[in-house]
Image (cartoon, helix red, strand yellow):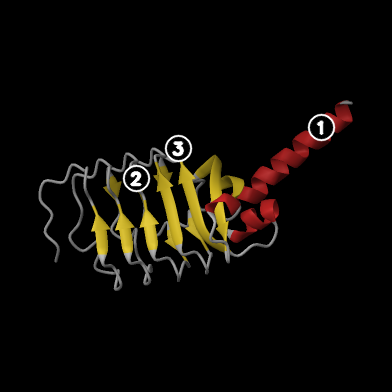
Amino acid sequence: MKMRLLQHLFLVLLYQIIQTKCCTKVTFVDTLIKIQKSGSIDYKDMLTAKITGCIVPEIITEQLGNVVIKGIECYNQSVPTLHESAVSNLPELDHLVISYSKIKRVKQKPFNNLPKLTSLTLSYNEIESIDNNAFINLDALVVLDLSGNKIAFLDPGIFSRLPEITRIYLIRNELEVFEPE
């Protein structure tokens, strides 16, 4: 009995090490996410995964098998900081939502190798600061929703590296003056 318990604890520890190996810092801890597979148009078909570490193909494949990921939604979780490479290497990802998840800070480059990402929603968190390079290399991004946060200041150049951006939602923040470049 004790041996079986030790084996189980070892496997749990090994699983956690595997999940966190891809991140520079752990962003998600036991976070539930919904995943829309490529080709699926019905949101009832979304898969659920529990993530510790960062959202990358290796972790998702471990739980759900080999799936092409079109969309990810994360609501009502505790994600205080989006660290570098928090969501990475998902070449087919079209939309990403992390809302009502208590994010306070978005560090530089939390989104890497997401060439088809057109919609990013970080609404209704508690975002107070966003690093200047937070949205770098999101060349396909069309819509960015930062509404319902605590943003009081944004560097005017923060959106200058988003060549396809057409809509930025900033309502319900603490911005007093925002003048685009």
Return the residue nearer the eye: 78 or 166.
166
Which residue position holds label 2? 105
Mark 2 lies on a secondary structure that is strand
Which residue position holds label 3? 76
Q: Amino acid at mark 1?
A: Leu
Q: Earlier in the sequence, mark 3 or mark 2?
A: 3
Residue at x 57% of width, y 50% of height: 44
Q: Amino acid at mark 3?
A: Asn
Would you call the spot at circle 3 few (<14 residues within 10 Å), some (14-19), or many (20 or more)?
Answer: some
| Residues at circles 3 and 1 in contact by the CB criterion of under 8 Å | no
Residue at x 32% of width, y 62% of height: 143
Residue 83, can we see it? no
Is 8 rendered above or below residue 146? Answer: above
Which residue position holds label 1? 6
**In the drawing, does residue 95 fall left or right of residue 141?**
right
Q: Which marked residue is nearer to the observer: mark 3 or mark 1?
A: 3
Residue 129, can we see it? yes
Residue 109 picture location, percent across and down: 40, 60
